Image (cartoon, rainbow, N blue to C red):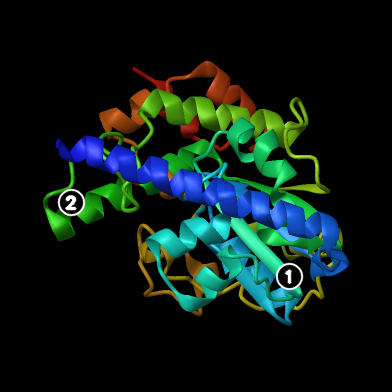
Amino acid sequence: MPSNLIDALRRTKRDLIYSFEDTVRIIEQNFLSSKSEIINQKAIRIVGLKRSGNHAIINWIRKQEGGNVWYLNNLRPQQNPYRYLDEHYPREKWEKEAKGNLTKKDCLIYSYENCELSKIIDSDFEEKHELYLGKSAERYDVLILRDPFNMLASMLHNHKKQIQQQGQITKNYFQGKNRYGRDKKGGEELISLWIDYAKEFLGETNFLNHNKVVISYNSWFSSEDYRKELSQKLKLNFSDRGKNEVKDFGGGSSFEGLKLDGTAVTMDVLNRWKTLIDNPQYRALLDNRELVQYSEKIFGHIPDTEKLRES
């Protein structure tokens, strides 16, 4: 029997088991009053594109929050988060939560990267949100956006670094699979996704509707007053702890790795674009009027970036 057919049969069997487990748990929730108790005092769903400062901001939120904080990283939309983690990164605690034995938490943070907004807020998943993650006293949707000039520069530089270290990675950043085995988005698809996120950021669309908080990574990095304002919106106890840390998720900074952990404020994250000013692939990605227009609406004009569009 062909291996792809065997894999398909295994997935079908797995999905049937999961469907049965969900049905049993739904019946239990309907008859057991204990199933309606608060599990998460606060649940924060983080949405962002890769190389947008997601992990820096998430770490900062965790440090402001305190207490029993759980973080579920880089999930797949439309799936039970704990089930997904147990399948790919098996641990006893993931298995326990996946089966519905949910631990009470002060704050649950769970993140999605490079995902379509419509899939993240999928109606079937939303109906099972409490089934999978437990009831939350408060829910927040946080959208993180970095200007496209520096985000794309970090993506391409990080890919170049991986080629030097591992060799076998495709020379085209937008081809092949990422480190999690998922198909990468093409350059045009990624630009389109950034524009979709920008529209959500500005309120032109409203997919995210649980106390939505939008975060400009540029402003978060450079302004303490901005971070204080975010703390108030998310009901955090502001201390600014974690601001200078560089986390190991994704290998840390695309440019410095983990070398500046403890002094992250010294990283030149708002000028990464200058290092790729002569890169034709980079310049081609930015040759998009709508992309630039939305960038300027949110981040203002970044001086000298007009040189990237000169022939």
Q: Quadrant of residue 208?
A: top right
Give whichever of 217, 100 is nearer the camera: 100
**Image point (11%, 52%), residue name:** 167
Nearer the N terminus, badge 2 or badge 1?
1
Q: Is residue 305 left or right of residue 97?
A: left
- Kind of element beneath mark 1: strand
Residue 225 in sight: no
Look at the image and tell me in which quarter the N terminus lies. Answer: top left
Comparing 253 with 102, the one in front is 102
Image quadrant assignment for residue 34: bottom right
Give residue 247's mark. none
Q: Position of residue 227 (x, y in %)?
A: 74, 62
Reading the image, the residue beneath label 2 is 163
Q: Is residue 242 left or right of residue 34?
A: left
Q: x%, y% of residue 296?
A: 63, 30
In the rendered image, residue 95, in percent from the top left (x then y), is placed at 51, 69
Of residue 295 and residue 105, the one placed in the foreground of this image is 105
Q: Quadrant of the C terminus?
A: top left
* Type of the residue with mark 2: Ile
Give coordinates of residue 282: x percent, y percent. Answer: 34, 32
Q: Which residue is mark 1?
A: 107
Q: Give left or right: position of 92 versus 251.
A: right
**Residue at horizontal 17 percent and vertical 40 percent from the top:** 3
Taking depth in this image into account, of 244 and 102 the one nearest to the observer is: 102
Three-letter residue code for mark 1: Cys
